[in-house]
Image: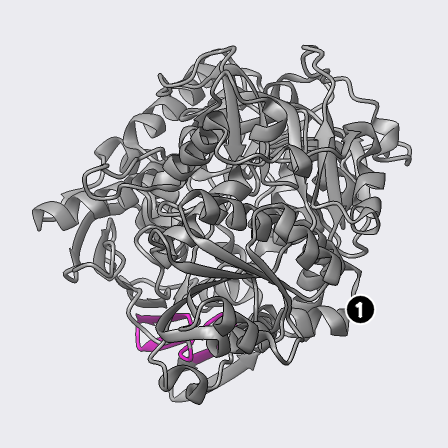
């Protein structure tokens, strides 16, 4: 399929051939008819990309602070490499489109193949021929509305939400600062709601054109007489000022305060500077309100991704209902956007579309898509993505291209000489193509073909946790070695299925290979700790304190469908103590602090008992301060002590003598991958025995049960015996 990608380093636009996205639960595949190109939001992203590194830093100081914090813990070189990796990646573009449903996933009854729908959302409503869109980001298009007009629905919903935040009433005076596409839609909707509207813009042409779209008065933002003109039009000043402009300057909000009436309302929709002076708002007791994109549900993964709607009796207008309201305005004829959608260009010319948008003076430009129903051809010509000849060695096929894959795994794999990055699949398809261009994969593909292909020697599963088990099972059934980023499974039923398939392959005389991303046991300082206690004859006592940091309960990693933090991250530390003690886990006890409304079972105390009498106490905490080191380990045994602080400082004490080592933080990722690749290449067993992977996974599921019942949970005797 055709798709547009933006280069975050150079700001260049490329039209590419990409695999179609996969149909997933809770959403639908939509063949795009039109997508709307935004002169504001998308062009601003590309303008930032074209800036120098210093310019990018000034544009995003929040990200600079993150990089500085990362450099303090992981070192300047590691931070620099991560920044370069992010900047070198390509990104899908677009967030507002319309088309026809091709297929509906499990749990979607509202939409059927053939339905005409409007689509919204960054990462979903892309400029691509086919998109996967969650059901709450879809809205049916009335028969009387063309798909060209419907492609502006997401932008229209943003305008509607701004008006809802303004709480506009019939007969009020509304001033709109910024008369671009979003501003013009806001003007039209305010007029339809019975308001008197003032349009203000920095460009004379935009201000004048606003009157043709319904504004009663048009002013220039830099006009010294603007406030007087507003009061001549409405003697008390504007009841509401809605800022739809995009500028880092604070001039827009200062102007809004100047023209507002006493106790007026200012609503910020666009990206503007918010440093308004106190005197400007205090004297009039003005209210300043932010408007969050399409409306309630935005940035809530339960709403947008899981499809959990808000009860209409409590939340009348969600982002989907705002989309539906905009479509109803179009259907009723109360707003006419035909003059806004006269500029169209084929997706094949998408590069020119971006380059010409500003020069043309158009409010928007619609990308048109060929309606051929051809399915994705998995045999994409790989020469476009990787011209180099294939070297001898392992051919890697990857599923998933998330943050961990892009920042850690893929850069590391590129360093191995006897490894070829073959095919890669992602849920969206477009991001697979971006990974090809960023990391040198030979071709984008579908997940089924990656796993089944004879050209794949080794499968890496780096997708969301909820999908891990299905890909591991598929790899085992296709007799492919598989590396999976933790966790192995998110339910015990999934774990049992993996175990059954693994055993079936063994009984059939095959040698199944499964490796899980438990990297910390391979860290150099972990190996020093094991060596320090290598000759022990007594049980060990271990304390582990993890200052994991706060994550909102609605963060995707907190969701039970994705395993939650215990199964998804705490597993690392269970595996660490298991590797240091070197004996099977016999039982698990656990307690959790009361969650209240802030936490989600991520302040826990866990005790593991081992077959040799060793014990490990693990504190995993979300209520700490980031200034304190994240991971702290203490090991006590036979009069000796090992203290490991965040994989940077190691102290080993015995007979009153302490040796202290300090180095750049190394959590064992490189060593883990090296051992795994060598094992597959030479036919050796996995660096971690499969039975041990099951044991650690079952222990993590037992932690959740132990918290619930307040009693110790024994770990399977069969698992312990096998270990």
Residue 29 versus residue 573 in the image, above or below: above
Which of 675 and 332 lies nearest the eye of the viewer?
332
Left or right of 538? Residue 671 is right
Residue 450 picture quarter: top right
Which of 693 and 381 lies nearest the eye of the viewer?
381
Asked if one can make out residue 378 in the rendered structure from this viewpoint, the answer is: yes
Image quadrant holding the C terminus, namely: top left
| Label 1 Cα neighbours within 10 Å, binned few <14 / some 14-19 / many ≥20 | few
Relative image position of residue 582 (x, y in whole percent):
37, 52
Q: How many dots with numbers?
A: 1
Magenta range is: 627-652
Which of 391 and 283 lies nearest the eye of the viewer?
283
On the image, numbered disc 1 is attached to which residue? Answer: 52
Q: Residue at x 27, y 41 (%)?
A: 316
Residue 311 versus residue 606 in the image, above or below: above
- Is 24 one of the magenta-colored residues? no
- Is 641 one of the magenta-colored residues? yes
Which of 330 and 195 lies nearest the eye of the viewer?
195
Q: Residue at x 80, y 68 (%)?
A: 52
| Helix, strand or loop for disc 1 | loop
Relative image position of residue 623 (x, y in whole percent):
28, 69
Relative image position of residue 267 (x, y in whole percent):
43, 63
Residue 29 picture quarter: top right
């Amino acid at each position: 399929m055709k798709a547009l990608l933006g280069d975050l380093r150079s700001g260049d636009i490329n039209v590419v051939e990409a695999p179609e996205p996969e149909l997933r639960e809770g959403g639908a595949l939509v063949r795009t008819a039109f997508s709307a190109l935004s002169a504001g939001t998308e062009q601003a992203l590309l303008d930032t990309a074209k800036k120098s590194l210093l310019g990018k830093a000034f544009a995003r100081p929040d990200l600079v602070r993150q990089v500085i914090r990362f450099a303090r813990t992981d070192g300047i070189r590691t931070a620099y490499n991560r920044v370069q990796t992010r900047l070198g990646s390509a990104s899908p573009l677009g967030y507002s489109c319309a088309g026809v449903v091709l297929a509906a996933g499990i749990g979607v009854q509202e939409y059927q193949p053939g339905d005409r729908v409007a689509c919204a959302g960054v990462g979903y409503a892309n400029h691509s021929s086919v998109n996967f869109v969650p059901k709450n980001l879809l809205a049916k298009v009335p028969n009387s509305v063309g798909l060209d007009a419907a492609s502006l629905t997401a932008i229209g919903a943003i305008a509607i939400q701004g008006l809802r935040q303004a709480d506009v009433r019939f007969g009020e005076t509304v001033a709109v600062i910024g008369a671009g596409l979003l501003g013009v839609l806001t003007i039209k909707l305010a007029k339809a709601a019975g308001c008197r509207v003032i349009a203000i813009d920095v460009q004379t042409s935009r201000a004048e054109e606003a009157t043709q779209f319904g504004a009663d008065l048009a002013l220039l933002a830099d006009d010294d007489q603007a406030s007087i003109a507003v009061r001549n039009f409405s003697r008390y000043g504007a009841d509401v000022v809605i800022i739809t402009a995009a500028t880092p300057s604070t001039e827009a909000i200062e102007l809004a305060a100047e023209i507002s009436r006493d106790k007026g309302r200012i609503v910020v929709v666009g990206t503007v500077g918010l440093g308004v002076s106190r005197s400007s708002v205090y004297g009039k007791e003005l209210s300043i309100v932010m408007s969050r994109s399409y409306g309630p549900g935005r940035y809530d993964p339960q709403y947008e991704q899981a499809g959990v709607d808000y009860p209409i009796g409590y939340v009348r207008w969600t982002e989907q209902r705002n989309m539906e309201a905009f479509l109803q305005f179009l259907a009723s004829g109360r707003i006419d956007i035909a003059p806004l959608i006269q500029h169209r260009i084929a997706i094949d010319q998408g590069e020119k579309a971006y380059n010409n948008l500003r020069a043309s003076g158009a409010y928007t430009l619609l990308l048109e898509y060929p309606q051929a129903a051809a399915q994705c051809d998995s045999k994409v010509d790989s020469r476009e993505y990787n011209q180099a000849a294939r070297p001898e060695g392992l051919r890697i096929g990857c599923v998933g291209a998330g943050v961990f894959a892009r920042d850690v795994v893929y850069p590391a794999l590129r360093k191995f000489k006897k490894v070829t990055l073959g095919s890669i699949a992602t849920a969206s398809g477009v991001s697979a193509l971006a990974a090809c261009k960023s990391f040198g994969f030979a071709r984008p593909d579908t997940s089924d073909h990656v796993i089944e292909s004879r050209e794949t020697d080794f499968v890496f599963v780096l997708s969301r946790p909820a999908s891990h088990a299905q890909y591991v099972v598929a790899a085992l059934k296709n007799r492919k070695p598989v590396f999976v980023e933790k966790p192995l499974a998110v339910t015990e039923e999934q774990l049992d299925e993996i175990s059954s398939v693994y055993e079936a392959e063994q009984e059939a005389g095959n040698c199944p290979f499964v490796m899980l991303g438990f990297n910390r046991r391979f860290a150099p300082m972990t190996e020093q700790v094991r060596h320090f206690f290598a000759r022990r004859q007594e049980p060990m006592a271990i304390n582990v304190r993890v200052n994991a940091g706060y994550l909102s309960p609605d963060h995707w990693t907190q969701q039970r469908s994705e395993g939650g933090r215990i199964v998804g991250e705490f597993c690392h530390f269970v595996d660490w103590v298991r590797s240091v003690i070197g004996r099977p886990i016999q039982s698990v006890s656990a307690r959790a602090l009361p969650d209240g409304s802030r936490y989600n079972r991520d302040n826990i105390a866990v005790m593991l008992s081992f077959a040799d009498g060793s014990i490990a106490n693990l504190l995993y905490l979300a209520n700490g301060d980031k200034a304190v080191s994240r991971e702290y380990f203490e090991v006590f045994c036979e009069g000796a002590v090992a203290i490991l602080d965040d994989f940077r400082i190691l102290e080993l004490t015995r007979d009153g003598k302490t040796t202290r080592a300090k180095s750049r933080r190394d959590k064992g990722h490189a060593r883990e991958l090296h051992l795994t690749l060598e094992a597959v290449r030479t036919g050796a067993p996995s660096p971690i025995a499969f039975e041990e992977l099951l044991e650690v996974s079952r222990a993590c599921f037992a932690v959740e049960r132990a918290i619930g019942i307040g009693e110790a949970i024994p770990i399977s005797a069969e698992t312990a015996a096998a270990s």
